[in-house]
Amino acid sequence: MKYSIINKRIGRLAAASLMILFYFSGCKPEQYPITTNPTLNIIQYFDTNPDYSIFDRALIKTGYAGFLGAYGRYTVFAPNNTAMTAYLQTINKSSVDEIDDNALKDFVSFHIVQDTLSTLNFTDGKLPTATMFGLYITTGAAIDGGITSYVINKQAKVIQPNIRTGNGLIHTLDHVLLPPTQTIAQILAANPKYSIFSQALTATGYYDTLNVVPANSSNRPFLTVIAQTDSVFNAAGITSFADLKAKYSTTGNPKNPNDSLFLYVAYRIIPSLQYLGDIVSSPSQTTLAPQENLPVALINSDVILNQVVFNGILEVGVPLDRVLGDVPANNGVIQSVKTNFKYKVRQQAPVYFDVTDQPELRKATSVYKKVGATLPITTGLVSAFSWEAANNYSGPVYTVDGAVGSKQYFVNNDYVLIGLRLGFTTIPSWFETVTPLIVKGTYKVWICYRNGGSGGQGRFTQVSVDGQTLGRIVDFGTTLPSSTSSRTVLESQGYKRYIAEQPAGSTTNIAQLAGVVTITSTDVHRIRFTCIKTSGGSTNNVFLDMIQFIPTSMSQTDKCMSVNGNIVNTPSTFP
């Protein structure tokens, strides 16, 4: 894919697979018994098991025992007496009765989830449902003597999971869980590993942004910060905040919104709560840097930020540090990176999007670019593709031209064969794909395809980008209006040739203008084709080859594509 995100979208399914615990080489999960006693509810189970007597007393004192004894769906992370005794010693109390009622309610509520969550729901990240305290807890893994165990919030180990009762599940812990009491800013400031980054937060004013608790200010969201340790700075030749300021501050005033150090920090703050599992399941993350997003990729089990090919040059991304990441704060979460990265200022550039250049297809080496090969694309096979559900429709088909030199004139000799038709239960009416990274700006959008030569192919299609409807209807049944028209005349009519090797007299391969779109953020985007009318016949195939986004300020016709995938000057044989 020209100018694309590398391995950009493995997708939610692959992300979930990555995050499943206990697939560590050479390790095996500890074999726990699963206790089932549906005749007891949760509080009755605690009442009849002395090893939970201290936590049971905390539930009674706070009133939580009432609903845990009633019908419902709950999960309780229950510290045993050893864990509770150790906790009481750390706070200089001899019993839970000596703890302030409100503080004890906060403590207890952080151990309860109003949902039934077994260990099957434990992934390397936050649980899908928040605790009754209002914050999420995370799950992970620890290896001890070759045995892998569940770890909760990096604070406690599960010593007996999945105790099933009549109204939910209990997971026994060897330590208590403590809700975060500090903000992101406070946690970073207190950790000497982040001294340079914390000074940068103060210098840019973002310390204050990261020091607000959302509950105290309704218009403030939970935040995520991509922090960086001093050792990572040191590896980049930055040994102090003075070095950082000298390297990145372009105005001398880091609080200036136009200063590069200000943007350096803004580019690392995500205005939402994003644990590792959330980050990897999204193609990009919005940041506080104006209209600049962070592309996300999953590469060889690493979560990589900001890895793209821009203007033909690979920009290597930065991996998130899973060990140091997912640190909860009372106003968000802290992630950490393994290498330095900066805010990138990119200028508008054409995007020549070869629709078949998808990471999943590239991995299908037995068919990818193999002459005459085909591969049905079932749901989920290519994460960037989606389409309307239709009865017995197996999906688009990746297709390679049947013979070298057959004059089909597809970029890289391949295309995606898409079913697209209106009013049929067996054929989708829309198809959608995710674009490569597009720099914010205004573009003309060209749809490049081959006319199949059938009268039934006159499907009139509306194109939209991120829900923006483009101004022209694309008719996939159209060929070039005239084989002898000049580039200027064709462009004025909304057409152009796009393959350098295509003879001037050939009209079957065509680029058709779908309209003009304003891209408001530097990011990947979704482009959808929606059939709005079918002009007779029974053929429904669209031979989709390429989508071009060319800035409106640039010539639309002085460059074209070679069949080998290179961008070349338009041949003089094109009038």
Image (cartoon, grey):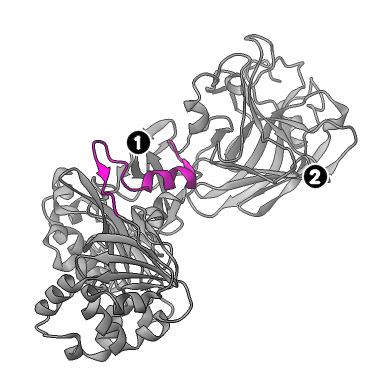
Q: In the image, is residue 429 above or below residue 131? A: above
Q: In the image, is residue 284 above or below residue 222? A: above
Secondary element type, mark 1:
loop
Q: Which x, y percent locates residue 498?
A: 65, 26
Residue 425's label in the rendered image is 2
For label 1, count other residues whose C-alpha is less than 10 Å away and answer few (under 14), some (14-19) or many (20+): few
Structural distance between the alpha carbons of marks 2 and 1: 39 Å
Q: Nearer the viewer, residue 547 or 43?
A: 43
Q: Residue at x 9, y 78 (%)?
A: 89
User: Which amino acid type is shown beneath numbered disc 1?
Assistant: Asn
Q: Is residue 147 magenta?
A: no
Q: Nearer the viewer, residue 171 or 216?
A: 171
Q: For residue 37, what is the image quadrant? A: bottom left
- Looking at the rendering, in which quadrant would you find the C terminus? top right
Q: Nearer the viewer, residue 310 or 64?
A: 64
For label 2, count other residues whose C-alpha is less than 10 Å away and answer few (under 14), some (14-19) or many (20+): some
Q: In the image, is residue 206 above or below residue 490? A: below
Q: Is residue 27 magenta?
A: yes
Tell me if label 2 and label 1 are in contact, CB under 8 Å: no
Find the magenta span and give its range.
Answer: 7-32
Q: For residue 106, what is the image quadrant? A: bottom left
Q: Which x, y percent locates residue 149?
A: 25, 52
Q: Which x, y percent locates residue 249?
A: 24, 56
Whether residue 138 sits left or right of residue 513 in the image: it is: left
Q: Residue at x 26, y 60 (%)?
A: 158
Q: For residue 482, what is the image quadrant? A: top right
Q: Residue at x 48, y 32 (%)?
A: 359
Residue 300's label in the rendered image is 1
Secondary element type, mark 2:
loop
User: Which amino acid type is shown beneath numbered disc 2?
Assistant: Thr
